[in-house]
Image (tube, coloured by chain):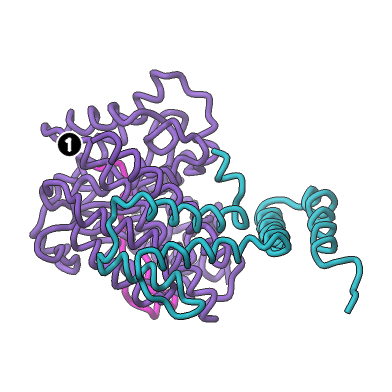
Chain colours: A purple, B cyan
């Protein structure tokens, strides 16, 4: 199957670049995603628009691709918009919507160097100056992404938040999720009330990545090489992306480094302001960190339901369900801290 | 019926074999899977310990007493659903220190089974 895919993809790429020949140097399945398969493909191309050795990533729906996230063609269009806006992301090259080619919809993008491993990054022995540099860069990347505003003809599939308020829209959505899940979660209900009662002044509605966290961007040393995993992109408040990145669950044990276990929030805000020209309210970022904990709890509950319903029996999904109490304890502590600080 | 050695003992020993003898032989995805199995077994062991000490019943009594003091009705065995519903319907004062305390009791009880290390951070 693997070598069949290698032939299919290399022929497809040769067709797109006009290469006379394409020799497969390396082809392997990359880690990540139950929703999609990622393949690394290194080719020696002769002739055409991209010659000699080229490294690509091919991303296609997994056989069991059940998901509420974006489809591959939608994700491709989001990636195109982000790349055009100057976000450091893999360059989206070609989308193939013809299922006759590989059996599934896929697209090809350039392959970035480095590693996305969160443990490696959080444990890395960076100087304070390197930490500032990385975190400012993360802020700058988000600011570039957030220059994309609705309406965008190519992104018409993205729905706008209800009543124009992304925060209240999320609160209503998560209450619906809790109803569907049918398991009582008093802490999440309590946190949702707090989120409803403490909505900050909404920012502009912008294109948010919505999964921008340590583990979803590639680093080569202290250099960011690519922002990955665009399938949750949505129109939302800019602070949703910053809150998700700072959320306690994504610090991988380095709890005192608020920005993804790497560095300080002030540097993130500074890096953001440098590109956007406008500052963000740190209190709004804190609010969206609370929202991030609730969202991660919702995702974990839904994942464990996929296991419990028999739709996808999996130890990993089952264990994710048992993580919800961690988010609940963080919510109790974090909301208390915010209340005490007022 | 007496059935020795007891289940908790069997599970503890089995988990130790997995961690000490099998996991070190594994790499990559297999190792990750072995550690997930050890994690699940750890939860089962701790749940048995908590039950032996009557902890789940004590947590339930705390919730029942909290609801009774605030005249919130709950069907037998559905205290947590009643609590969640009362919060959603805003029938409880969100600044009530007793509310936060009962929420903390429930959360900590789960973490003592799921991930006691998380309570020590």
Q: Can you give x and y, in whole percent of width and height, for residue A129 in the image?
A: 39, 18
Q: Was residue B63 drawn as part of the magenta stretch in this picture?
A: no
Name the residue at 47% across, 71% down: A62
Name the quadrant of the C terminus of chain B.
Answer: top right
> Considering only vertical position in the picture, is A156 above or below B93?
below
> Considering only vertical position in the picture, is A217 above or below A66?
above
Q: Can you give x and y, in whole percent of width and height, for residue A264 in the image?
A: 35, 28
Confirm whether residue B33 shows in the render: no
Q: Can you give x and y, in whole percent of width and height, for residue A169 in the image?
A: 19, 63
Q: Dot 1: few (<14), some (14–19), or many (≥20) neighbours within 10 Å?
A: some
List the residue tagged with mark 1: A280
Pick whichever, A263 or A180, lies toward us. A180
Q: Can you give x and y, in whole percent of width and height, for residue A298 in the image?
A: 39, 63
Q: Which residues are magenta?
A: A87-106
Name the residue at 67% across, 56% down: B39
- Left or right? Give the position of B77 relative to B35: left
Pick whichever, A76 or A210, lies toward us. A210
Q: Was residue A97 drawn as part of the magenta stretch in this picture?
A: yes
Which quadrant would residue B94 be assigned to in this image?
bottom left
Name the quadrant of the N terminus of chain B.
Answer: bottom right
Name the residue at 43% across, 60% down: A58
């Amino acid at each position: 199957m693997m070598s069949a895919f290698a032939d299919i993809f290399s022929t497809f790429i040769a067709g797109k670049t006009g290469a006379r020949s394409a020799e497969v140097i390396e082809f392997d399945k990359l880690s990540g995603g139950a929703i999609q398969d990622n393949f690394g493909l290194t080719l020696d191309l002769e002739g055409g628009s991209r010659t000699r050795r080229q490294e690509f990533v091919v991303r296609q729906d997994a056989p069991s691709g059940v998901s509420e996230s974006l489809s591959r063609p939608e994700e491709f269009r989001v990636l195109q918009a982000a790349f055009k806006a100057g976000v450091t992301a893999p360059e989206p090259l070609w989308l193939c919507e013809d299922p006759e080619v590989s059996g599934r919809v896929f697209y090809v993008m350039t392959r970035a160097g480095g590693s996305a491993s969160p443990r490696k990054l959080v444990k890395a022995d960076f100087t304070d100056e390197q930490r500032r540099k990385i975190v400012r860069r993360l802020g700058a990347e988000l600011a570039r992404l957030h220059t994309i505003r609705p309406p965008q003809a190519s992104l018409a599939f993205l729905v706008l938040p209800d009543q124009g308020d992304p925060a209240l829209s999320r609160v209503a959505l998560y209450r619906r999720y809790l109803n569907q899940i049918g398991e009582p979660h008093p802490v999440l209900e309590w946190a949702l009330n707090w989120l409803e009662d403490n909505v900050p002044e909404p920012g502009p509605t912008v294109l948010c990545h919505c999964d921008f966290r340590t583990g979803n961007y590639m680093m080569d040393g202290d250099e960011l090489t690519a922002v990955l995993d665009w399938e949750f992109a949505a129109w939302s408040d800019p602070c949703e992306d910053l809150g998700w990145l700072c959320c306690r669950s994504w610090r991988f044990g380095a709890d005192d480094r608020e920005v993804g276990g790497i560095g300080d929030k002030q540097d993130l805000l500074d890096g953001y302001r440098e590109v956007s020209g406008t500052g963000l309210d740190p209190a709004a970022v804190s609010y969206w960190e609370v929202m991030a904990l609730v969202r991660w709890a919702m995702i974990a509950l839904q994942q464990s339901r996929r296991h419990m319903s028999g739709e996808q029996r999996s130890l990993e999904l089952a264990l994710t369900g048992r993580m919800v109490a961690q988010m609940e304890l963080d919510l109790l502590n974090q909301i208390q801290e915010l209340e005490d600080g007022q | 019926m007496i059935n020795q050695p007891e289940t908790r003992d069997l599970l503890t020993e089995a988990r130790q074999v997995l961690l000490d003898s099998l996991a070190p032989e594994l790499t990559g995805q297999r190792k990750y899977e072995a550690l997930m199995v050890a994690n699940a077994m750890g939860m089962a062991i701790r749940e048995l310990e908590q039950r032996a000490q009557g902890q789940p019943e004590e947590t339930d009594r705390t919730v029942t007493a909290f609801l009774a003091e605030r005249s919130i009705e709950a069907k037998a065995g559905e205290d947590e659903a009643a609590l969640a519903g009362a919060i959603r319907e805003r029938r409880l004062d969100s600044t009530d220190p007793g509310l936060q305390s009962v929420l903390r009791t429930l959360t900590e009880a789960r973490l003592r089974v799921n991930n006691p290390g998380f309570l020590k951070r």
